[in-house]
């Protein structure tokens, strides 16, 4: 198999996700000549408290879109993982330099437009293997409706993150000819409230502490989520009846600055007008109604990158049951978890066309993933202090 087509040619798995996670033979080792690329907004917790949650979310989304547009032109698929305030991607050697250059240009635009510092790093998979890490990938149609996502096992992506965030990591300069294409970026939806007043939004991060039991423990955690909250569709925070466009000039201007790197009055007014008439398109057009249905089906609410990252809609009773199950695993030394309760979810989008080529990145309102990560980091710091 040619290295560049490693991920594109992986077979799409189906069936119970917990069963797939428990079977490492269903995963393939990432080729050593591939590269891990990471982005991360430094000081994201402070940025959220300053009211920059939309900008942080868009910057993270833009990291993925920049890479996917390059891969699309090459006719390739890439595995990616959205993290609320950053993203992790894997790329073949033929695309890695161009993607890194685009991300460095994205970093410049982010600083100029939002006064946010976007960390960008690239780590060869061969370097991760040389340090004893493992990195396995599979892909699955996670809901049986065309939402194909990557699954990663091993500690490779976490090691890459530690390398990039290390004090001695050398930040690459932006190449003079760096090109950034964020075509398809959209962020027009209002915050998405739960379907009933008895439901809430939960952002959850789970790490496994015992590397040799990673796949088995991840499968157990996912099984607990499924037993308590139901299927991915049942716990999806995005519902068609709650999807409402938010046609404010501020929201569209924020999207425009993230996408184009500058203010462009003609674009701003044109997109504002299209957003204003969007409800008519959804209500009166068969294509519009189909798009709304597919938005729900193609909302990415579960990421497994060696950890579990998920956004869930459910009741307080369900959340309490899950917390008890997770605390039991935590007390046994199997996992650490971070959990944040939010009043709504937020969504940013990558739309190549409105029929079926789109994907929607979901986070909790106010930076749910970032807040859950903060809780998780506090637990891990206590572990380090206690020498456990």
Image (cartoon, rainbow, N blue to C red):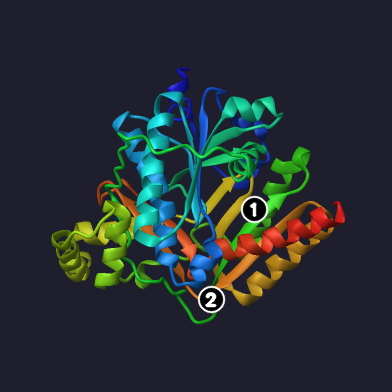
Observer-nearest of 256 and 224? 256
Image: 34 above or below 204: above
> What percent of the width, then of the height, locates residue 196?
47, 79
* Residues packed near mark 2 inside 10 Å, few (<14), some (14 to 19) or many (20 plus): many
Furthest toward the top, the residue is: 1
From the viewer's perspective, tell me whether residue 107 is left or right of residue 74: right
Q: Residue at x 75, y 40 (%)?
A: 211
Rendered location of residue 376, percent (x, y) = 68, 60
Q: In this view of the protein, can residue 31 be seen by the observer?
A: yes
For label 2, the residue is: 199
State the residue at coordinates (65%, 39%).
Answer: 159
Residue 346 left/right relative to 288: right
| x then y, percent, for residue 12 | 48, 35
The foreground one among 196 and 156 is: 156
Q: Position of residue 175 (x, y in %)?
A: 36, 34
Q: Quarter-wise, where is residue 99 in the image?
A: top left
Mark carried by residue 222: 1
Disc 1 on helix, strand or loop? Answer: helix
């Amino acid at each position: 198999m040619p290295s560049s087509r490693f991920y594109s040619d992986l077979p799409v798995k189906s069936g119970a996700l917990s069963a797939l996670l428990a079977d490492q033979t269903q995963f393939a080792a990432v080729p050593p000549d591939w590269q891990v690329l990471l982005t991360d907004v430094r000081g994201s917790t402070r940025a959220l408290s300053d009211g920059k949650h939309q900008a942080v979310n868009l910057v993270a989304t833009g990291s993925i879109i920049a890479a996917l547009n390059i891969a699309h032109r090459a006719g390739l698929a890439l595995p990616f993982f959205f993290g609320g305030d950053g993203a992790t991607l894997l790329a073949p050697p033929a695309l890695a330099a161009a993607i890194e250059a685009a991300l460095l240009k994205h970093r410049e635009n982010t600083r100029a437009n939002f006064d946010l510092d976007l960390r960008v790093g690239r780590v060869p998979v061969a370097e991760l293997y040389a340090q004893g890490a493992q990195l396995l990938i599979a892909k699955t149609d996670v809901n049986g409706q065309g939402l194909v996502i990557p699954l990663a096992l091993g500690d490779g992506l976490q090691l890459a993150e530690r390398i990039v965030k290390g004090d001695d990591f050398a930040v690459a300069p932006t190449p003079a000819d760096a090109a950034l294409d964020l075509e398809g970026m959209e962020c027009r939806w209002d915050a998405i409230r739960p379907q009933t007043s008895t439901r809430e939004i939960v952002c959850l991060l789970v790490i496994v502490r015992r590397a040799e039991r990673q796949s088995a423990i991840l499968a157990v955690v996912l099984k607990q989520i499924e037993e308590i909250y139901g299927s991915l569709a049942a716990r999806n925070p995005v519902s068609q009846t709650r999807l409402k466009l938010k046609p404010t000039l501020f929201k569209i201007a924020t999207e425009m600055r993230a996408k184009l790197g500058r203010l462009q009055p003609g674009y701003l007014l044109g997109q504002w007008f299209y957003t204003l008439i969007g409800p008519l398109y959804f209500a009166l057009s068969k294509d519009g109604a189909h798009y709304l249905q597919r938005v729900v089906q193609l909302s990415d609410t579960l990421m497994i990158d060696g950890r579990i990252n998920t956004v869930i809609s459910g009741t307080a009773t369900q959340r309490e049951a899950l917390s008890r199950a997770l605390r039991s695993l935590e007390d046994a030394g199997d996992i650490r978890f971070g959990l944040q309760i939010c009043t709504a979810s937020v969504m940013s989008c990558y739309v190549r066309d409105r029929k079926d080529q789109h994907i929607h990145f979901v986070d909790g309102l106010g930076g749910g993933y970032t807040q859950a990560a903060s809780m998780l980091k506090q637990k891990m710091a206590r572990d380090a202090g206690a020498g456990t």
